[in-house]
């Protein structure tokens, strides 16, 4: 799992709202991811790297290893793994970029819905 839950005490902290359990992820929904694709290969100074924004959409819902995952049409690379996947319409985190499936030179990326992580990490 490429995710961590951090408990912060004191003050008011900015946050991104999460998709509620009673809300759904729509096929065709426009999404964004953030990250550092290829990490230090992007620039000379790793401490000066700027985060990259990549846009795409949810292409399908499938069962993989007994869990529901969403395949996403987005150019994610190593360094994007674990990124929150946010809906451009609502601004909410709808999932977490979990990986890709490679077939020769072709690749498809997938995300797990954010509700999966809340259930797995907080029960």
Image: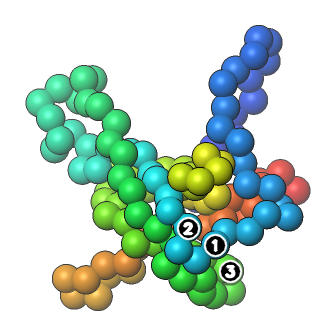
* Residue at point 42%, 46% (across, down): 34
Quadrant of the image containing the N terminus:
bottom right
Question: Residue 29, which numbered label?
Answer: 2
Secondary structure beneath dot 1 equals: loop
| Number of the front mark, 3 or 2 | 2
Residue 55, quarter of the rendered image: bottom left
According to the picture, the residue beneath numbered tag 3 turns out to be: 67
Q: Is residue 51 visible?
A: yes
**Seen from this angle, which residue lies furthest top?**
11
Q: Which class describes the residues within 10 Å of circle 3: few (<14), some (14-19), or many (20+)?
A: few
* Residue at point 67%, 32% (across, down): 15
Gap in angstroms between the C-alphas marked 1 and 3:
17 Å
Question: Residue 38, which numbered label?
Answer: none
According to the picture, the residue beneath numbered tag 1 turns out to be: 26
Quadrant of the image containing the C terminus:
bottom right
Location of residue 56 with respect to 103 vertically, above or below: above
Image coords of residue 2 (percent x, y)? 54, 54
Q: Earlier in the sequence, mark 3 or mark 2?
A: 2
Is disc 1 in contact with disc 3, using a CB cutoff of under 8 Å? no
Q: Earlier in the sequence, mark 1 or mark 3?
A: 1
Q: Is residue 39 left or right of residue 44?
A: right
Gap in angstroms between the C-alphas marked 3 and 2:
20 Å
Location of residue 7 with respect to 22 vertically, above or below: above
Is disc 1 in contact with disc 2, using a CB cutoff of under 8 Å? yes
Is disc 3 in contact with disc 2, using a CB cutoff of under 8 Å? no
Gap in angstroms between the C-alphas marked 1 and 2:
5 Å
Image coords of residue 12 (percent x, y)? 75, 16
**Seen from this angle, which residue lies furthest front?**
89
Image coords of residue 7 (percent x, y)? 75, 29
């Amino acid at each position: 799992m490429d995710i961590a839950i951090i408990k912060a005490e004191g003050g008011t902290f900015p946050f991104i709202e999460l998709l509620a359990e009673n809300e759904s992820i729509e096929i065709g929904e426009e999404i964004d991811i953030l990250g550092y694709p290829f990490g230090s290969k992007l620039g000379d100074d790793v401490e000066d790297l700027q985060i990259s924004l990549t846009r795409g959409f949810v292409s399908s819902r499938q069962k993989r290893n007994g869990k529901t995952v969403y395949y996403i049409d987005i150019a994610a690379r190593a360094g994007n793994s674990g990124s929150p996947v946010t809906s451009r319409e609502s601004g909410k985190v709808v999932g977490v970029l979990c990986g890709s499936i490679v077939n020769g030179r072709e690749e498809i990326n997938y995300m797990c819905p954010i509700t999966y992580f809340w259930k797995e990490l907080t029960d």
